[in-house]
Amino acid sequence: MTGLGQGAGFTGLDWVRNGFVTRLGIDPWPGTLNLQIEAAGDQQAWYELKQTPGIDFPAGDPSACDARCYAVRIDGRIPAAIVLPDVPGYPQNQVELVASLPLRDTLELREGDTVDLVSGDRATIATAIFDVDGTLVNSVDAYHIAAGRAAEPFGYEVTRELVREALNTQQAFWQLVLPEDRHDDADLIQQLRDATMRHWPVVLSEHVSPFDGVAETLSALRDAGTTLGIYSGSRGESFAPLERAGLLDLFDAVLTASDVSEAKPHPEGVVSCMAQLNARARTTAYIGDTAPDMLAAEAAGVLAIGMLTGAADSATLSRAGAHRLAASHPALLDILL
């Protein structure tokens, strides 16, 4: 149903936007989607959800009210949050939704259409499988540095945006960098690849480390009895920072591109890692930072958690099918435990 038209102003406030990103990994699209709850069973489900603590969202302005949020998934495919303002007289049969995508356009909604919401809560996660680059270590920008150093003598520019585009769309990276008339120059592309890998050890040593909170997150998960695995689409070129930090030993299974015949978004790597860990899909999460990570998780039937620490923003991850989003490893821990 049409709301009061104040949603865009609300989500556009800096403290509101930062709050959604920090707490829910949602960089909100301007505006909110309002739903009217009509069926008695749905009203009961909403009443029961409101009896749970939710996610506190304190006001960042003296003139504003506190709120609670509830993570949900819309129509089985878009992560969102119900915002429940702490104000007297708020309608009992209304829910207001915030997401990273324009919900009316994405879902092709018209006034009076029915929308399905499923709580973002899930059965206890017994197994957490991690991507590495952009998820556990900050290597995405490091690759940009190495590739840029390789391309410079040839007169080409490598931007961060091109690196992120390649990782999220799986387009051939050097064909994104090179002009169209050089796309078929296999010798040039191989020279650029070789030069990048020559620069990589120095860039890795100088620029790549585990993200803040990774050690604490992994330790807390292990202490809680969660089984940990890695499935990386790389061949392990950026594992050294995890080894130096003593973190690689926390994982019971480690798979790379060398261990599979099909790359992401094919689920082979996730499924193979689950098999090694004797894990069940319904209690497994795959955590990654790109659209192919989310697609692979969805295809494997596991919880897909998109991290905002790497190559994709929350809209890209939402569009790719993330169940939940996290802006940091402390926020990830709140989802998994």
Image (cartoon, rainbow, N blue to C red):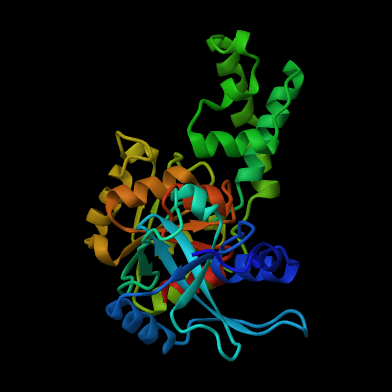
Quadrant of res 17? bottom right
Q: Position of residue 258 (x, y in %)?
A: 36, 37
Q: How many marks?
A: 0
Give residue 212's position: percent from left, percent from top: 62, 65
Residue at 58% x, 65% y is: 328
Q: Nearer the viewer, residue 153 or 301?
A: 301
In the displayed structure, would residue 93 be above or below residue 72?
below
Does the rendering let one see residue 6? yes
Name the one closer to the observer, 247 or 165. 165
Give the quarter of the image for residue 269. Answer: top left
Residue 87 drawn at (x, y percent): 61, 88
Against 70, is 188 above or below? above
Residue 297 pos. (x, y %): 35, 51
State the quadrant of the C terminus. Answer: bottom left
- Residue in view at x 61 percent, y 12 percent: 180
Please say if 275 is above or below 164: below
Residue 20 in the figure: left or right of residue 293: right
Q: Nearer the viewer, residue 114 or 291?
A: 114
Q: Quadrant of residue 27?
A: bottom right
User: What residue is rendered at 73% in x and 79% in y?
Assistant: 60
Instruction: Tell me if I can see residue 132 in this picture.
Output: no
Apparent side of residue 305 relative to residue 160 in the rendered image (left or right): left
Query: Residue at horizontal 38%, vertical 40%?
Result: 264
